[in-house]
Amino acid sequence: MRDRPWPMLPIVTAWWTLYGVASTSQWLSMEGADGEVMPLREAATLGFASAWLWIPMTMLLLWCVRRFPIERGKAWRSTLATLAMVLLLVLLRAAAVIVLNPWVGWYHAPPPYDEVLLASLGNNFLLLWLMVGAAHALLYAARARQRERQAEQLQAALVEARLQALASQLNPHFMFNALNSIAEMVHHDPDAADRMLVALGELLRSSLDHQARPLVPLHEELALLRHYLDLEKMRLGERLRVDWAIEPRLDELPVPPLALQPLAENAIVHALSLRISPGRLSVQARADEDALEIAIADDGGHRESTVHHGNGLANLHARLRHLYGEGEWLRLEANDRGGTTARLRMPRRAGSTGVAA
């Protein structure tokens, strides 16, 4: 039962119409005292008139249950109000029979009103209380569905708030490292520092737009990563070389925003920037039927850190857990180039994560 009773009207009408069909069939199967079967028109009149009289009465009863539900804290008041409504409907049913009898023909000769009232009380009092019970079942079921929807909305809002909190921690961390890099360049290459500031502004603008959604298309995340790597190449020059190996037709697959930049930053800060000779960073993306896998590998030496160490990787791990649940979504492992590979493996379809793309 919804907040307004009127959406129940088509259901109530359909129910009592079916009841009218069943009543008509029952009248047609009965033989009169003279052995004759009741004509179809007369049987339909009796069957549908008896059934359709219940439509407005059922709507009144539904309204009463919504207005005065029998529940803890107000059981006596609600029970008395419901009893008054049931008795009123018994009276109305008896009055309707008296008024409509000339056209419907429940009685060949109309009996006194008190006899019709007693018949209505005997026939309908228990039925009305059964309907009260059914109306309460509908009411409680609707409330349970509403609580379930509210719980789902609260859970989604909580996950979103946690993701936003993690992203707000990531941006200052990234800004600190980027500004340190620019500060180093100012003293020996002001022009390069100026270009880095322009690139940083573009990167920050893109990242702010980027993080407003829980999931973004892969091509947007790769574009943001290119901005970041362009910035780092200005700082490191020939000491940083980047290889890209992205399988085709992956552009629209959903990924968490700002997921790749922390992995690249971790490789550059803890491995490649410490080398004097040129280092190589490779970015690979491939997919199977179930998952998208992205690997960012360096040749700067194996690192013992795990995904739980460091602000950037720890935040990324927490975001992945909030989005996809528990699982090994991110791994750091040694590679055959003498360096470390950060490997992300995420569900290919956003619907399987519980978060809308």
Image (tube, rainbow, N blue to C red):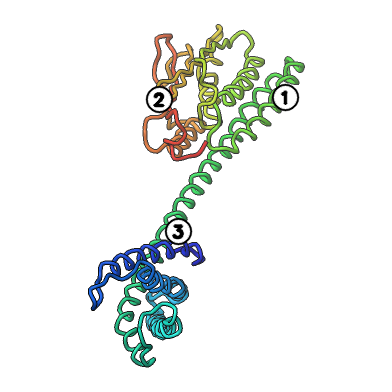
Q: Is residue 114 above or below residue 205?
A: below
Judged left or right of residue 226, residue 41 is left
Estimate the x, y position of residue 328 in percent, counting from the top left.
37, 30
Estimate the x, y position of residue 296 in percent, counting from the top left.
48, 18
- The residue at 36%/80% (across/down) is 106
Q: Is residue 245 above or below residue 177?
A: above
- The residue at 55%/42% (across/down) is 164
Q: Earlier in the sequence, mark 3 or mark 2?
A: 3
Q: Which mark is residue 212?
A: none
SS assignment at label 3: helix
Q: Earlier in the sequence, mark 3 or mark 1?
A: 3
Evaluate if marks 3 and 1 touch, with contact meaning CB atoms under 8 Å apart: no
Of tags 3 and 2, the one toward the viewer is 3
Evaluate if marks 3 and 2 touch, with contact meaning CB atoms under 8 Å apart: no
Residue picked out by circle 3: 146
Q: Depth check: 332 or 110 in front?
A: 110
SS assignment at label 2: strand
Q: Earlier in the sequence, mark 2 or mark 1?
A: 1
> On the rendered image, what quadrant is the N terminus found in?
bottom left
Q: Depth check: 85 or 341 in front?
A: 85
Estimate the x, y position of residue 32 in percent, counting from the top left.
25, 75
Q: Is residue 248 above or below residue 220?
A: above
Residue type pointed to by label 2: Arg
Q: Is residue 344 above or below residue 79?
A: above
Residue picked out by circle 2: 331
